[in-house]
């Protein structure tokens, strides 16, 4: 009985927030764009998306080689399941799902696969920050407060990354913490 009550509470909360998000939506305009959309652009978009997923699969395959060699062909569905989970569930739960599925299919421990996923995310963050710092001077129209905000959080990320590397370099010193 409690589960049914929780389900309907979740549906009610979702309905309220859907209403709040869509209450000013002009359905006539939506219908116009549905009718006049250029759907042929979806084909190359889907191809480019899955090429990106394959490239990330290859990167993860390369990172997992030290633990267990897993062919890219068997790893690709695991990565797709993880990204599907990221799209459906909150808080990037798809990353945990990816580690769980890898454990079930390839018998690689969840903690080891989560460590490789963490390294992936750190790498992605560094690459994005490089893009920000390269692109920031090229866009002079960004308000100064946004520029300060971006630089501040970038420095915070780099600071956290340095702390992470210091802890990783000498773990015995930080075990007591």
Image (cartoon, grey):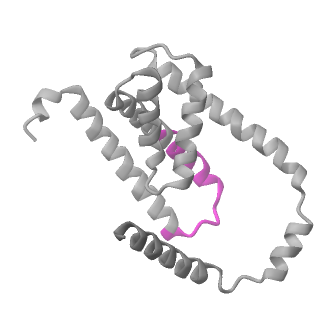
Question: Which of the 4 image quarters holds residue 48?
Answer: top right
The quarter of the picture where the N terminus appears is bottom left
* Membership of 80 in magenta stretch: no
Residue occupying image coordinates x 47% and y 37%: 98
- Outermost residue toward the front in this view: 1
* Horizontal and vertical percent position of residue 119: 41, 33
Residue 128 placement, left or right of 161: right
Does 55 appear above or below 28?
above
* Horizontal and vertical percent position of residue 155: 38, 51
Residue occupying image coordinates x 63% and y 62%: 140
Residue 155 placement, left or right of 126: left
The quarter of the picture where the C terminus appears is top left
Does 147 appear above or below 70?
below
Of 92 and 101, the residue lying toward us: 101
Residue occupying image coordinates x 85% and y 67%: 34
Residue occupying image coordinates x 88% and y 74%: 32
Q: Main secondary structure of the magenta part?
A: helix
- Outermost residue toward the left in this view: 176
* Membership of 143 in magenta stretch: yes
- Outermost residue toward the right in this view: 36
* Horizontal and vertical percent position of residue 81: 56, 39
Of 80 and 159, the residue lying toward us: 80
Of 8 and 70, the residue lying toward us: 8
Residue 61 placement, left or right of 173: right
- What range is drawn magenta here? 126-145
């Amino acid at each position: 009985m409690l589960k049914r009550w929780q389900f309907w509470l979740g549906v009610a909360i979702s309905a309220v927030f859907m209403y709040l998000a869509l209450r000013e939506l002009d359905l006539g305009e939506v219908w116009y764009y549905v009718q006049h959309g250029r759907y042929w652009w979806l084909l190359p978009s889907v191809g480019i998306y899955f090429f990106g997923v394959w490239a990330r699969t290859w990167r993860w395959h390369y990172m997992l080689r030290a633990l267990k060699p897993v062919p890219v062909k068997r790893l690709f569905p695991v990565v797709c399941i993880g990204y599907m989970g990221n799209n459906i569930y909150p808080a990037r739960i798809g990353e945990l799902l990816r580690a769980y599925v890898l454990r079930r299919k390839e018998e690689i421990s969840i903690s080891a696969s989560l460590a490789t996923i963490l390294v992936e995310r750190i790498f992605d963050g560094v690459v994005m920050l490089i893009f920000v710092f390269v692109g920031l001077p090229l866009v002079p129209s960004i308000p100064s407060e946004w520029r300060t905000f971006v630089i501040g959080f970038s420095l915070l990320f780099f600071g956290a990354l340095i702390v992470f590397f210091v802890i990783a370099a000498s773990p015995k010193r930080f075990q007591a913490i």
